[in-house]
Amino acid sequence: MLSLSNLYSVELLLLHPAGLNAFEMFLKSYNPVSITEITDGPLRLDLLLVIDCWLLSNEGKYIEKIKEKIDLIGLQNYVEGDLGIENLCKLKNFILKTLEQRYFGPFMKSMLMENLRKEVFRHELLQIRIDQTSLQRPGEKIRFECRELPLDD
């Protein structure tokens, strides 16, 4: 379950579908000064997700997608040698750090983050109320379905 404390870490935020969705929507709507950053953020997030897919499955079909995204972003010089697990883990950490440094600050100030905070707060409050009733066994967590958040105009 996504908690308010998880919202302040890029890595933890991206582990939950609602957090990932909000951050991705922000990246796609982000309008920075540099034209490069408009496409760079979503591409970096896509690359991060493809690397995670490869790390979880080790399927060769993801390597071509990774190479394609590395070329699109221009990270060829960053990846030394083959695309083995060590280099992909380094690349993943580099991308996470870049997303945090370039985009997470503006995301934290966005309406998408504000809406996400409200939604998570409601879920935490509901969980506390459910824990206080006899409808649920001690230690059992309730699962919530998060709604898709609207884009800022």
Image (spheres, grey):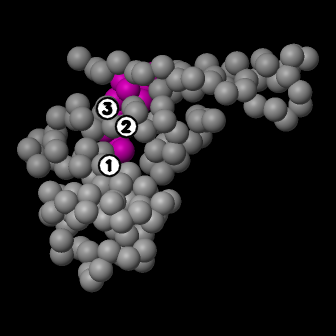
- Toward which corner of the image does residue 141 lie, by quadrant? top right
Residue in the picture at 76% in, 23% down = 128
Taking the magenta stretch, the answer to whether it contains residue 145 is no
Q: Amino acid at mark 1?
A: Leu
Residue in the picture at 28% in, 20% down = 152
Q: Earlier in the sequence, mark 1 or mark 2?
A: 2
> Is residue 56 found left or right of 81 in the rendered image?
right
Q: Which residues are magenta?
A: 104-115
Q: Amino acid at mark 3?
A: Met
Residue depth check, mark 1 versus mark 2: number of the one nearer the observer: 1
Residue at mark 3 to residue at mark 2: CA–CA distance: 5 Å
Residue in the picture at 19% in, 49% down = 40
- x and y percent of residue 91 in the render? 34, 68
> Is residue 1 found left or right of 127 in the rendered image?
left
Mark 3 touches mark 2? (CB < 8 Å): yes
| Mark 1 surroundings: few (<14), some (14-19) or many (≥20) residues within 10 A | many
| Disc 3: which residue | 25
Out of 32 and 48, give the one closest to the viewer.
Answer: 48
- Toward which corner of the image does residue 139 lie, by quadrant? top right
- x and y percent of residue 3 in the render? 61, 35
Mark 1 touches mark 2? (CB < 8 Å): yes
> Is residue 27 found left or right of 60 in the rendered image?
left
- x and y percent of residue 102 in the render? 28, 50
Q: Earlier in the sequence, mark 1 or mark 3?
A: 3
Q: Main secondary structure of the magenta part?
A: helix
| Disc 1: which residue | 45
> Is residue 129 found left or right of 105 in the rendered image?
right
Q: Quadrant of the N terminus?
A: top right
Residue at mark 1 to residue at mark 2: CA–CA distance: 9 Å
Out of 16 and 153, give the one closest to the viewer.
Answer: 16
| Disc 2: which residue | 23
- Toward which corner of the image does residue 26 lie, by quadrant? top left
